[in-house]
Amino acid sequence: MREILGRRRRIRLRRKERAAQLDAALTCATEWRWPVLPGAGLTSAGGRGTRGRGCACPDPECVVPGAHPFDPGLLAATTDERMLRWWWGNRPTAPIILATGGSAPCAVSLPAVAGARALAELDRMGMRLGPVVATPTRWSLLVAPYTLERLGELLYAKAWVPSSLRFHGEGGYLVLPPSEAAGGQVRWERAPLPGSAAPWLPDVEAVVDALVEASNSAPDGGSRLAY
């Protein structure tokens, strides 16, 4: 009897997790108008990846298992509710991939340890931030959409930018919670306010300026944003 009850609980938990994926994708697409699509996902066993699980894509040496577009490709990202229900109806545990740029949010990401330090420093500085996505390896600060030309001008004007920064702009993508992908669970370190309209996003220049200042303020003269 205990075995039967345990199996039922596991089934209910799996159903709840699957519903959470679709609900999150629908919130992004239909409420916030962020174009999303399902990621490659993880296989049940074998290969390099999370807890012995490999990427479902054909590349046996995939460096970001599960956490990238594959089939469909990135250009298929959409806000269409019917398409999302069909995708996650067939692949209920697929990671949620945000196609960054255009009218969608972009992001600035750092290694996880540097990201935690940076957020603490930005809070101390009084910097207003938008949502922050965290994985075991990197933290990503969502910012307002920017073009590659704008990013190029911004970086060119800087005497120095921490090498640990990565930019997710036009033509890029980002894995959103509550996905499971390379390295483990994807979560909100700073979640969008519940029940709000599309989350507020800071300007990329303000975030980069603040990150550079936070990095230069390390008491030992080093960088807070180093690996």
Image (cartoon, grey):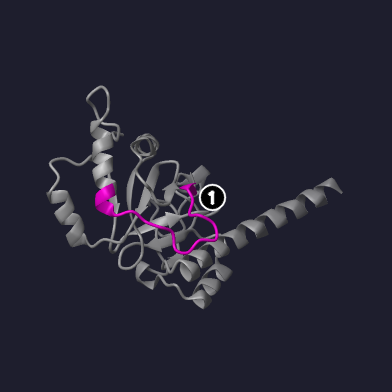
Dot 1: few (<14), some (14–19), or many (≥20) neighbours within 10 Å? few
Start and end of the magenta stretch? 187-206
The secondary structure that most of the magenta stretch takes on is loop
Give the amino acid at mark 1.
Ala
Q: What number of labels is visible?
A: 1
Q: Which residue is mark 1?
A: 45
> For this view, does 199 lie left or right of residue 86?
left
Q: Which residue corresponds to the image point at 20% horizontal and 42% vertical from the top-left?
A: 161
User: Along the line of sight, which residue is nearer the eye, 103 or 170?
Assistant: 103
Q: Is residue 164 visible?
A: no
User: Along the line of sight, which residue is nearer the eye, 227 or 62?
Assistant: 227
Say if 221 sits above or below 98 in the image.
above
Q: Is residue 155 visible?
A: yes
SS class, disc 1:
loop
User: Along the line of sight, which residue is nearer the eye, 224 or 178?
Assistant: 224
Residue furthest top in the image: 220
> For this view, does 134 lie left or right of residue 165?
right
Q: Is residue 119 magenta?
A: no
Q: Is residue 204 magenta?
A: yes
Give x and y (percent) for residue 82.
52, 77
Say if 174 sits above or below 84 in the image.
above
Give x and y (percent) for residue 61.
37, 50
Say if 217 sits above or below 100 in the image.
above
Q: Which residue corresponds to the image point at 33% horizontal and 47% vertical from the top-left?
A: 109
Give x and y (percent) for residue 190.
46, 47
Residue furthest front in the image: 126
